[in-house]
Image: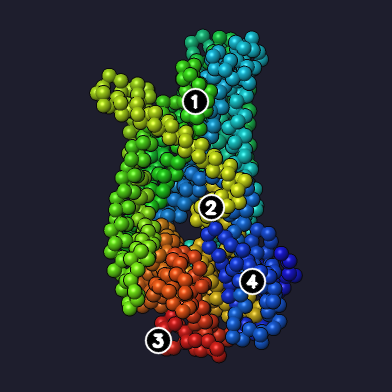
Amino acid sequence: MEQAQERAGSGGGSGPADPGPPSRETGTALELLVHGVGGTTPAQMLDDPRTVRITGDHIAAVFRRTEDADAESRPEDYRGRPVPEAYVWCNLTSGNGTRALWLLLLPFMVVNLAHWMRPGAHGRIRTVRLYGLLVRLAALTLTVLLVAAACEVAIDLVAWQCAGTRACAERHSWLGFLSPVTSDGGWWSPPGRRLALAAAVPAALTGLLWYLSLRTWRAYESQQPMDRTAEAEGDLGGTALNRPGFWYGRRLVARLRSAHTAAGLLTVAAAVGVPAARFDRAPGGPAPLDTLGRLLEAALVAGAIAAVGVTCRRGRSENRLDRTLDQHVVRRLPFAALVLLVLALVYAGWARPGWTSSGRLPGDMTFGGIALVQGLLVVVLGVVAHALYRARPEPRAAIRGLGGPAVAMLACALGGVMSGGVAQRVSDWLDGTGTSIDGPPVLLTWQASVIPPLLLVVLLLCAVLAGHTWRLARAERAAVEGDHPGEAGDPARTRRIAAARAMAGLTDRGPLIVAVTSVTTLLLGAAALVGALATDQVPADATRGTYAVVHGAAETAQALGSWLIGLGFLLFVTWGRRAYKDASARRTIGILWDVGTFWPRAAHPFAPPCYAERAVPDLTWRMATWTRVTGGRLVISGHSQGSVLAAAAAWQLAPSARRRVALLTYGSPLERLYGRWFPAHFGADALGSLHRDVDCWRNLHRRTDPIGGPVRLPGDCGPAVDREPLKDPLTYGRTDLHPLPAPILGHSDYQADPAFAEERRRLLARLRPEVPAPRHTGQAPPVVPGADGGPGGC
């Protein structure tokens, strides 16, 4: 597409310190369209194949129709209609194929969501900080778990077990130079040197995560929001999303990146150095190496304490922009961990006559300790979240304020499944006969064995919900017929409409599914940990000699769980590989990130990047410069996830600019998803403050929409924001305007509904070029020529 030259009035002009050109109150109205999940093209949004980029780049930009490119210079041509613009941000989440690899960071993204799911609380600063601290610690354990899984595969299964076993090494000739037998005592054949060489894999993984975090920060999250004027300095109430530094957390991300990188490198150093230190500590071991081993272990413990201490430091500072960095922490901690890793590699690679590899490396203690710490953190997090919820109950909050702990539990479970899946598949690949090596730690087998009963519980829950949905669909048939009186009945069409409404209601059952799954996961995970530590045997061996039905169930669960966890991991990798090559599949993955990566990386620095730290400043700059330069009216029109971005951008405006903006949302998950799952930031108080701050807000929704819904503000504010549910389909039968059956639209094509144009005209009628319309007076809003009256009570 042709790129237009940027103009002062198109949002690409003055910086934070430049007040910009003086206001020219042309009275021109602007409609800023923001698309939702999955993305779209400027031509589709503007309903014109000829579009021009006004401002922005290839990642995110504002487009207009070609004929509207110079609308500011021709205000007389836009007396009765707004200038349409489209903000296109889909490339932030579903651009090139490499972003499909972000699937591997799914547990990190989920635990980062848990940070933002805390209940709302005013005046309980210490409790809120404790909540954030617990989530950050849980996120740190996930990094350690991922690196430990890489160590298990490369160091234990490949270098220690397979290369140290003649049958396995002969089966895999590429390991011949590591085998003491096939290499005839080659230089790399001693156990310590094999471990040191294999440590390159988890160390490279840690370095890759560090690099991706730094690179994505610079590409996505380094956009500084607008500096707030003195007028807005005291305007920090309602919600944290209107604070100047909310969308710019440079210091915290850098600090967490330092801590997590150090933790990963220390995990690799421990995986290599501890086995060598244990051999040196045995009777008859070399005394100098024993002393060095003890010093190394003490240094590793000190490094771990430092990484945890950095993670425990105070979290986000949202009242101002974090432009500075903790220089000593950011630069020295990862470097110190890297030095310890190099020392551990040299120490392990020292010649030790008589040291041979047999059995497994001590991985059960590592994975068992991680699982225990994660379980305790989730339980304590639940206690803290319950205390916050009791202090300020939010009736619509998901799981009575326990959404964050439940999601944190699922993040830990995802990390365990992915770690165990990799270890199980590599073990099966290395040991085709199942007799040459011992395989992964016992705990990973126990964790795989609890997957079948977990799936059984989920399937039973889904069956219950399916029955409830079927009954609800039958009950909706009468309501559908009542919505279309006087028309000839069509049983098949009635059933389809009723089924669409019932299926849309499943979204509201999401908290139940998450709650049951997380509680079941916690209980089964605890049972697996106890079973592994108590028996030190896999489930099939541990139950041998008991009742036949118990032993049979254990064998079945172990075999089925191993197969399922391996299949799940293979499907995961296959999906990512397909998305790398297939643009349509990549767009599907982009939808997942549209929802999951809206929030800044406040808990895990290796999570996929936050696109809102680019999109929200973009929209804020565009709205602020338009209202300042032209003095014109502005309606920001957001669909689906675009409505969330629109609300976040409106909160970032100065109060004077916010009062010149009207908000039109449709198919919006602001209350249905964000208000329930993130009550501290999108609860009733926050949405109510947004309604009071903007000039007017109208929201459109359908009963057949599985994502969007009403805003549900209390009192008189509710009808003032929410329009009655739109008809879907627009007509029940065939009419003169719709001679063919109208489709059931659900979440799409809101702009095709006549109600959309009607509400837009009313919002523009309220906004005056000179002074914002009076609000909450009970009087009819002012009317501009060619526009309808304003919505009553807005």
Q: Residue at x 61, y 45 (%)?
A: 580
Whichever of labels 3 and 2 marks the residue nearer the N terminus, that label is 2
Q: Give the quadrant of residue 1.
A: bottom right
Whichever of labels 2 and 1 marks the residue nearer the N terminus, that label is 1
Q: Label 1's element? A: helix
User: Does residue 281 sit above or below 736 in this rendering?
Assistant: above
* Foreground label between 1 and 4: 4
Q: Label 3's element? A: loop
**Proximity of marks 4 and 3: CB atoms separated by less than 8 Å:** no
x, y percent for residue 3: 73, 66
- Distance of mark 4 from mark 2, alpha carbons? 25 Å
- Label 4 is placed on what type of residue? Asp
Q: Residues within 10 Å of mark 3 (few under 14, many from 20)?
A: few
Q: Nearer the viewer, residue 105 or 241?
A: 105
- Distance of mark 3 from mark 2, alpha carbons? 46 Å
- Label 2 is placed on what type of residue? Thr
According to the image, label 2 marks what residue?
588
- Distance of mark 3 from mark 1, alpha carbons? 73 Å
According to the image, label 1 marks what residue?
428
Q: Residue at x 37, y 49 (%)?
A: 514
Asked if residue 369 shows in the view, the reply is no
User: Does residue 284 sit above or below 750 in this rendering?
Assistant: above
x, y percent for residue 545: 27, 19
Q: Which residue is drawn at 56% across and 23% down?
A: 158
Badge number at residue 48: 4
Whichever of labels 4 and 3 marks the residue nearer the N terminus, that label is 4
Asked if residue 381 shows in the view, the reply is yes
Whichever of labels 3 and 1 marks the residue nearer the N terminus, that label is 1
x, y percent for residue 98: 62, 46
Q: Label 4's element? A: loop
